[in-house]
Image (spheres, rainbow, N blue to C red):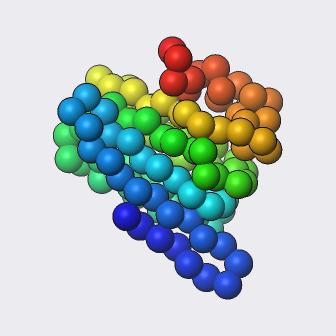
Amino acid sequence: MATIDDASVTLTVRREDRPDVVVLRLAGELDLSTAPYLSERIDEVLGDGRTSIVVDLDAVTFCDSTGMSAFIRGHHLSSAAGGFLRLTGAHGVVARVLKISGLDTLLSDDS
């Protein structure tokens, strides 16, 4: 688990290794200051030879363009390695941002 903690922002990334997929459960805000930590966690998963990643956004309260960029980057890297990156659990403002950007369709857990 990785945590960024300062006076205004907290992001927690919990990793759950399953036989067929690695689930990254995010909690908090995903923005310019925290998105690099998500990218590092994705890199760690891929570095471990795991290429199928599900990012659970159920506890994410905010996501800006840098968060979306981290998802796209992870999608490209995992796809290039023969796997995938999928998003699940988004709701509220986060779901709306993903829908407006089209990432809800591209990175849907249903695809």
Residue in the image at 66% along x and 73% along y: 9
x and y percentages locating residue 98 in the rendered image: 71, 34
In the rendered view, tell whether residue 23 sits above or below residue 75.
below
- Residue at 72% x, 43% y: name it: 94
Residue 66, percent from left and from top: 65, 52
Residue extending farthest top: 111
**Residue 82 visible in the picture:** yes
Query: Whole-percent x and y of residue 95?
Result: 73, 36
* Picture layout, residue 82 above or below residue 28: above
Specify the quadrant of the image occupied by residue 54. Answer: top left
- The quarter of the picture where the N terminus appears is bottom left
In-image side of 85 versus 57 (left or right)? left
Relative placement, left or right, of 105 versus 37 is: right
49 left or right of 73 in image: left
Instruction: Establish if 55 lies above or below 32.
Output: above
Numbered circles on residues, count:
0
Residue at image position (79%, 44%) is 93
Residue 111 drawn at (x, y percent)? 51, 15
Q: Is residue 80 visible?
A: no
Front in this rendered view, residue 37 or 22: 22
Residue 80's place in the image compared with 92, above or below, is: above
| Residue at the image point whose x is 64% and y is 52% from the top | 60
